[in-house]
Image (spheres, grey):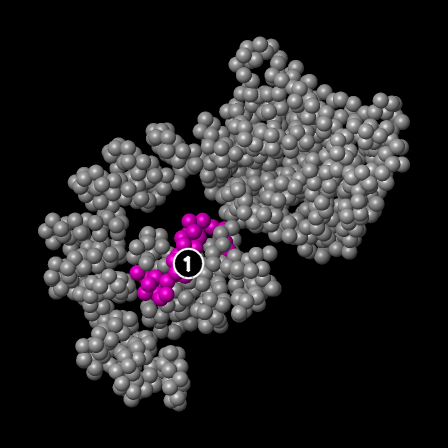
Amino acid sequence: MTVPGLDVVPDSIRLQQGREFPLDDVVALSRKGPYELAVERQVKRTLEIAPSSEPWRKTVRQCLQSLESFGDEIDADRHRLGVTASGPLHGLEVLRSLAAYAAAQKSVDDLLRQLSNLGQDHRRLWKHLVDTIRDLLTESGAAAPARELVELSAFRIARRLIVQVEPTEQISPRYPYLCSLLEDRVLRVDTKHDSAAVYRMVEELAQEWGPRAGAVDIAMLRSRLQARGVALRGDPPAQDRTAPPHRVSLVGDLEPADALHLEVHPAFEADISSAALSVLPPYVARPASVDDELRHQVARAAKGSRLVMVVGGSSTGKTRSCWEAVRAELPNWRIVHPLAPDRPAALLLALQDAVLEPRTVIWLNEANLYLLVKNYAAQVAASLQAVLTDPQRGPVLVLGTIWPDFWDKLTERTFEDDDLDTGMGAVHQLADLAVTVRMPATFTSPELARATAVVDSDPRLKLARSRATSGRITQFLAGAPHLWRRYEQSAGAARAILHAAMDARRCGHGPLLSEDFLRVAAEGYIDEATWHTLDEDWFAFHLAKLLSPHRQLPGPLTRYRPRSDQAPPGSPLYQLADFLHEKSRATREKESPASSLWAAAAAHSRTDTDMRELAQAARRLGAVECEQLYLKAAACGDVAVLEWFTRRLITLRRFERAEQLIENHCLDGFLLGELSAALGLTGHFKDAERLARRAYEVSGNVNGARSLAHHLLTLGMRRPAERVYSWLAETGDPVAARWLTAHREARGDRVTAERLARTALTQYGDPSAAIALAQLRVTAGEPGDAERLCRLVVGHGHAGLLVACARERSDHRDHATALCFYRAAAAVEHPKALEWMSWRCEGQGDHQRAEDLAHAAAAVGNSHALHGLAHLRFFKGRLQDAERLNRVAAEAGSVSAREWLMRSGFST
């Protein structure tokens, strides 16, 4: 198991239970390498980054405590701090970016200098961090700490911070939609709850699902509300609450026919009376590495809960082997096969404390249908892990089957589907708990020779042995060759229906496909010539052919029949044979789905989850002819696909429609900025400016206006650019303020330039324009005006930024500007500025002034100034001065000075 921030697998992981951080503080240790490395993580549901946010204050307080306890280790990068949270996403992303910038800097001054070049979000977050640290340090009633000390603490925390963003609940975009549904269409008239009570239930359920639950799924919402007694429109009559929610049977009481209910493939019909044969052929034993290992792992579940996963291709005998193993080893256990209303929701219901009993087998045939369903994956995995790791709820056996490529997705740490990847952390952790048994695809000749007596006892096995190629007995029994022949021999409308079903499944739709979905989707797979030859009942005719069995084997499609205790579907539902599904994932991998598939998804998807999965598939394939699908997916909470579609329209220069989507569906205001920038690049300057203003009104985004102004400048249109920058400066944008100030100064309008710089500093707290103007005045030979501006900057509390700019100018050999900046900062006793001025006076021969400045720096917390001055005098041969200054520096707290005294043989 890997830990974010830790480069290797940890030696140990422990949970800290503090007074204020129950189960929040996770410490991972690694002793591999030259020293022990620890990563200390805090886990939060949400983390709003603001000084008034209690989770944020707790997080920073814990970091300060760690800094006090492990300060040296943290500074040496042997102890790292971490935080894991789900949102708000933008703030966490900025925090992660700020931490990356801080880690790349050598000092707080370097970071402050870098911040001046970053966006407003980074500067605002840095201010929140500094303000929170200052508040926490003064909570005990002590005097307010120096700003430099607070900034140093913030820098030491930020540069060792690892931020892990967990998937957000994505509740907000759906709430207006849910409220209207509950009031107008969902809540039944005769319900005993009013809408306000149901709203509160929705909020409680959203919190209960946690940050890994993904968007609210309507099927899950329906089942959870029903459990709380809320009747929804279209619900079947209430059933007896005393009845179990699932079919629960003892394994030993099951008959061979029950294996078919657990999704063991039926065998084909032999050419003799079916009454003489069992439902299932005799079991042909697998090698010891499969059967013995599987039965051993199943039997061990009696000693403690465990997850066993049988990995193998379609129709290789996985489910049959599991059937034989549980019947042999756990005959007195219960068995639960969660299926309805859909598999993940049914499993979550089965895992509830009041439902799940010890000594139960949870049967997960095709486990990918439980663990790789977006918006369910993380919650299902976390719930299973909770059951498996809780001794009080066991013993429980979770027994699943899965295809190899799906198992690879469960275990690999990088995932192509970014949207599903956001919920895969819990799935990876669950997969780490699994014991896997690999199912071979074929029987070897020695294995068949040992099973001669068993094979000869059943005509189906004898026929399979004689006809199957390369020992693929189980595939032949399950009718795989016959299914493939039926597919290859299909043509016209029948093949179109199969292709529609195959593409829907490989694009993420669940196993149950409605009749209306198949009818609409199949139309796009029929060529024009064939379409005009079809009768009115073409779909029913060809669907019946695909449903027809052969020798008791199901056809390529089978109709789904719910049990008596399950709600009947609104329209007939069909399933594609899983063998065809697996084969089509490879054979049709490079085929583009027909546009009718997206139309069917928008109009006839069975669940919101199916619709969102197909919308994500359309997005991955770059489909733009399915606007209705994107709109409906956004209405169901998946706003990301509609945002992608809008950006795609912008790329295609369909600006008018893009603007309509943004305005009508309240999408992110940043999209308006992108649209504004695109319009500006195409010469639509008036519309670009209008949208840039609108983007700022909606979200405060100024990127579109900046892009427009920059583009106007590249075209030589300085007057329109100046108009845009003037408006931006009125919003407090630092980039616009700097450009306008420099522009006015270059034109000789010094009064306006200084007024703009003062306004940016005093009204918006941005000193960058004033500092840039001071630099211009120094270059113009007017140091007096420059110093006046610098005094104004430090007077508003920006001495640190001025020092950072001074170092930057010094690096560029602009010593006059650097001196001006340092002098102004030293006037307000900035520690670094005093140190620099001390060294400068020493270089000019003013030794007493240099020493006075170094003492002043030490008095405000910079003892290194004295040590640095001592260093200069040591190399000039003034050993007594060097010893005296180093002693004073050591008394002031300089570790470097104390080490120098010890190396030089002086007592400390």
Position in image of residue 810 (x %, y %): 24, 65
Position in image of residue 631 (x %, y %): 46, 31
User: In the drawing, does residue 558 fall left or right of residue 690?
Assistant: right
Q: Name the chief secondary structure element in magenta.
A: helix
| Observer-nearest of 775 and 485 | 485
- Give the quarter of the image for residue 492: top right
The part of the chain drawn in magenta is: 84-113
For label 1, the residue is: 99
Extreme residue in the left direction: 748
Crowdedness near tag 1: few (<14), some (14–19) or many (≥20) residues, C-alpha within 10 Å: some
Position in image of residue 111 (x %, y %): 34, 61
Total marks drawn? Answer: 1
796 inside magenta stretch: no
User: In the drawing, does residue 150 fall left or right of residue 235?
Assistant: left
The residue shown at (79%, 36%) is: 259
Position in image of residue 701 (x %, y %): 33, 44
Q: Does the image show residue 422? A: yes
Q: Does the image show residue 295? A: no
Please say if 310 is above or below 528: below
User: In the drawing, does residue 494 fall left or right of residue 84?
Assistant: right
Q: What type is the residue that disc 1 sits on?
A: Ala
The residue shown at (27%, 44%) is: 706
The residue shown at (82%, 40%) is: 447
The residue shown at (86%, 28%) is: 459
- Judged from the image, the secondary structure of the residue bearing numbered disc 1 is helix
90 inside magenta stretch: yes
Task: Tell me the quarter of the image containing the C terminus.
Answer: bottom left
